[in-house]
Every structure is written in C-alpha cells, then in structure tokens.
Image: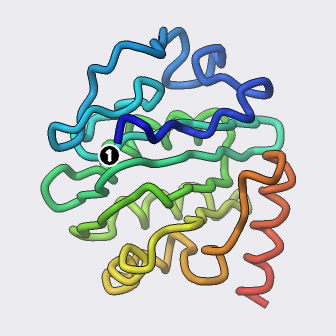
Amino acid sequence: MQHIEPFYNWRHLYRTEDDSKSPYHGKEYSEFEYSETIYNFYIHPQWDFFGSNTLYLKILMADYKKEYAIIELLGEWNDVIENDIMFLKRDIIDVLIEEGVSKFILIGENVLNFHASDNCYYEEWFEDIIDEGGWMVGINFRDHVVKEMRTENIHYYLQIGEQFNDIPWRQYRPQHLVEVVEDRIMKVLG
C-alpha cells in the first residue's frame, strides 16, 4: 500500500496545505517518513488522516468559486466499526460546505471494501447541498463496493454505478472532469 500515492498531476493547480480554507492548511508532508498505516500496512505519507483508522483521503482540488471539490480515497470504508462517514462529513465535508462547495467528486478506485451502517450522514450531506444545485458522485469505485452501497441505498444520495465507473479522470483537468461528471449526471436524471 505504501506505493499507492494520491494523484499528483494537479499539484501545480492546487495544494491542500497551501489552501487557507482547507482542513489541512499548513500541514507539512514528508516524502520519506512513513508513519500512517491501514491494518499494519504503511501508506504513502501524502495521504491525509481524517479520523478513520482504515480510510484516508487526499483533497486533490477545491475550487470555491466554482463550488466543487475532488477527493481521492484509499483503504476500507467502514461505517459499521469506524463510522467513517461521520468523520468524513463532520471534519472534511462540513468545512468545505461552509466555504461554499456544493459539488463533490469522490474517487474510489482505491477503496477496497465498504461496510455500511445507516445512511443518515449521507442523507444529511445530500440535504446540505441539494438546495445549492449540488451533488455527490463516486467515480471508479469497485463493483463490489458499488453493490454494497446500492444494497444500503447510499445511491439515493451519492451517485454511483457503471455510468460513473469508466471515467478516465487522470486525463482531464479538474474543471473538465467536473463537466464530464455533470454531463453524466444529466444523462442519468434525464
């Protein structure tokens, strides 16, 4: 797991540690000092801890004027034991919403498993952004993770599924990725 790095090709556009509105403003990162683990496996030091012992993230882009954030995830999303969604919502998402973000792209190709509890935090997140024309989309999540999320009705709040699982997101600039995702949302709703 230590070889899985957060996507870095947008770092010239955005660095969470330089963003005064980011929950990680001022954080100093190391390229060589591995200290965080998921199940005793060290992870790359560029990933950010947000309260979960099994799920880490990286805010790849936050554009407050255009009201979107792109967040990459790594690990096991466990709402049953770790209550990951509570920490994600309270410590990251609420901070971004307070700054005007209403559109969220979660990149889930490195989410290895998902264990659901209830969907009240997803519903709250959805209600916090829907009046602003906002949305939440999970792209490139593994099929078994999507299946588990659908079983627990998370898809009522977080748009997921095959229409969002073939997006070559690394090829796009952040704003173009948002446009591609919005286009697919319109096709799903239309």
Q: Quadrant where the N terminus lies?
A: top left
For image coordinates 58% across by 16% down, the residue present is: 17
For image coordinates 72% across by 57% down, the residue present is: 169
Three-letter amino acid code at the position of disc 1: Leu
Q: Is residue 92 above or below residue 80?
A: above
Q: Quadrant where the C terminus lies?
A: bottom right
Q: Is residue 151 left or right of residue 27?
A: left
Q: Residues within 10 Å of mark 1 (few under 14, many from 20)?
A: many
Q: Is residue 142 above or below residue 150?
A: above
Q: Picture quarter containing residue 80?
A: bottom left
Q: Position of residue 95 (x, y in %)?
A: 52, 34
Q: Position of residue 77 (x, y in %)?
A: 31, 57
Judge by depth and name the residue closer to the eye, 144 or 117: 144
Q: Is residue 21 left or right of residue 143?
A: right
For image coordinates 18% across by 49% down, the residue present is: 82
Residue carrying label 1: 55
Q: Is residue 30 above or below residue 64?
A: above
Q: Is residue 10 left or right of residue 25?
A: right
Label 1 secondary element: strand
Query: Looking at this rendering, what residue extends furthest in the bottom direction?
Result: 190
